[in-house]
Image (spheres, grey):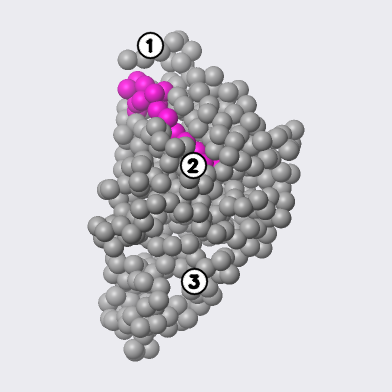
Amino acid sequence: MIDFTEAQLDRYSRHILLKDVGIEGQERLLSAKVLIIGAGGLGAPVALYLAAAGVGTLGIADGDNVDLSNLQRQIIHFTKDISRAKVVSAAEKIRALNPDVKVNAIQEHVFADTIRDIIRGYDFVIDGTDNFAAKFLINDACVMEDIPFSHGGIVRFTGQTMTIVPGQSACYRCVFTAPPPKNAVPTCSQAGVLGAVAGMLGTIQAAEALKFITKTGTLLTDRLLTFDALTMDFRKVTLHKQSHCAVCGENPTISALVDEEQAVCDFKNSKGLHATH
Amino acid sequence: MELKVNGEAKSVSADPLSISDLLKLFKVEMPDMVSVQLNGTFVDRPTFGVTLIKDKDEIDFLYYMGGGQ
Ligand SMILES: [Zn+2]
């Protein structure tokens, strides 16, 4: 049992008023640990909403520095933060927003040999990365460590997300098998993205994390939600866990993590696996 | 034949019709960037050209979306 202070009862009153959340749900939030991988377009709104919600421990993993071209959508970073480490910039905003939150700033990109140690101990993981190598790596690591996570992807005016509960629901690899061929992936500078689309998708991921922690509602599992902001068409496609999935199937062929080769799409940040648009 | 493509009823006259044919018919420019679900099962990409679609089938095109930063 957490003894709520007067200030906490006030700060979280709109959660406590929700009968599906209440004091018990808020206690769960304050005791929860969520890791956000990527402090960018998706990670920014996720971090702000989870901090505001009082998620007790927020891990943020990202090895990049803030670039001027990030500010069009990465709303946790301000003009004064240009050239600062993204995790330092994000941690500062989170602490200013809610001192109840303990921040673990992890100033590195995730790789095959480090990711399992990084994610271990967290209750839920947010994929806020911008490349397929990292998305598949996060999926496989979360399946192996049995940690639920939210997949998110955005490009131009569109977004997609699904929540994965390993062992129970379809994983990212059940749907997308393997990264697409590099020459088929449009370069990030060609693709572009509407800033608010990152906010729309990231906010859905944050809501899923809050639902998971408070055990509220029905998670976006076994369904891929896609939307097109140009028309505001939203669609959910029902999916199933695939028995032949290479990582979560009956006879998994992936037993060790590997770093996939990744198309680099920003010359300023062309240091290996990770790249920013 | 009558199909359900991405949740919408579609009438297609071509027969036989493979997944690859359908992708062309629906002007999917980069088939490498799409995962195809046929009646609830994902189709292996190398078999798109030989997997035939029949009347009343339900097909979903799911696009890879790699962005996030
Ligand atoms: Zn799977």
Mark 2 to mark 3: distance in Å?
A: 30 Å
Same chain for the residues under marks 2 and 3 in the image: no
Mark 1 crowdedness (10 Å alpha carbons): few <14, some 14-19, many ≥20: few
Task: Look at the image and give the residue range highlighted in magenta.
Answer: A21-39
What chain does mark 2 sit on?
Answer: A
**Image x and y of residue B30, in percent:** 53, 73
**Image x and y of residue A72, in percent:** 68, 46
The answer to if A32 sits in the magenta stretch is yes
Mark 1 to mark 2: distance in Å?
A: 37 Å
Residue at 38% x, 88% y is: B14
Mark 1 to mark 3: distance in Å?
A: 54 Å
Q: Nearer the viewer, residue B27 or A135?
A: A135
Is the distance from the Cβ of mark 2 to the nearest ligand 1 atom less than 8 Å?
Answer: no
What chain does mark 1 sit on?
Answer: A
| Residue at the spot of label 1 | A3
Nearer the viewer's eye, disc 1 or disc 3? 3
Mark 1 and 2 residues: CB-CB less than 8 Å, in contact? no
Q: Nearer the viewer, residue A68 or A217?
A: A68
The answer to whether any part of residue A226 appears in the image is yes
A191 shown above or below A212: below
What chain does mark 3 sit on?
Answer: B
| Residue at the spot of label 2 | A114
Secondary element at tag 2 = loop
